[in-house]
Amino acid sequence: MGRAIEMGQREQLMALKQKGLSLATIAQQLDLPFATVRNLSARYRRQGHLQVGYANCGPKQRRSEGLLERASLWLKRHHPTWGAPLIHQQLLQRYGPQRTPSVRTLQRWFRQQHLTKPRQQPVQVHIGQAKAVHNIWQVDAKENLTLVDGQPACYLTITDEHSGAGLEALVFPPQTH
């Protein structure tokens, strides 16, 4: 990665250039890469100074999409249950693929305008370990089994979690409603 060139060295570069030395000679004398000397020399010709390019630093101005951003936000406000992929499809049909922003851009716009709700995390209930017999039972059911003789059946087992003992095992025909 490149390093910043001090202002004193930049001024030396231009003084040597004005004396008529070649860029290769200047690069060698100042112990700088040739590409750096060439780029700084070109910048001096274009801008007339060798100041550090602070305009290239920091956050860039947000490029506003104007009409498409307003249209997507309007659709989201009027159809809050629509997600970004559906709104993207609507914009594609109306404005075409060249002008339509990506689904990810739409999601970012919606989040910036607080039009999306964070996903709800499912509540996890911690049951813990069984500390005594009959404290916690495990119930397991299997439906729509076919017995050896071809009859349909359901199967239900109840097991004590602490002792591992099978408390009940039932086989019964499926209920029809």
Image (cartoon, grey):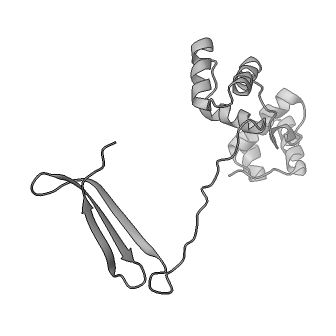
Residue 147 position, x and y percent, is 15, 57
Q: Is residue 101 left or right of residue 152?
A: right
Residue at 39% across, 67% down: 139
Percent across and percent down for residue 32 are 74, 50
**Quarter of image, res 79:** top right
Between 28 and 90, the residue placed more toward the observer is 90
Picture quarter containing residue 98?
top right
Q: Is residue 19 above or below residue 137?
A: above
Q: Residue furthest left?
A: 149
* Residue lying at 34% horizontally and 77% vertically, measured from the top left: 167
Instruction: Return the residue nearer the eye: 38 or 156.
Output: 156
Q: Nearer the viewer, residue 116 or 6?
A: 116
How many numbered marks are there? 0
Residue 22 visible somewhere in the drawing: no
> Residue 122, image x and y in percent?
60, 56
* In the depicted structure, whether residue 17 falls above or below residue 158: above
Q: Quadrant location of the C terminus? A: top left
Residue shown at the point (38%, 85%) measured from the top left? 163
Above-or-below relation of 112 to 3? above
**Closer to us: 21 or 174:** 174
Q: Is residue 17 visible?
A: yes
Q: Residue at x 86, y 43 (%)?
A: 52
Q: Position of residue 23 (x, y in %)?
A: 74, 39
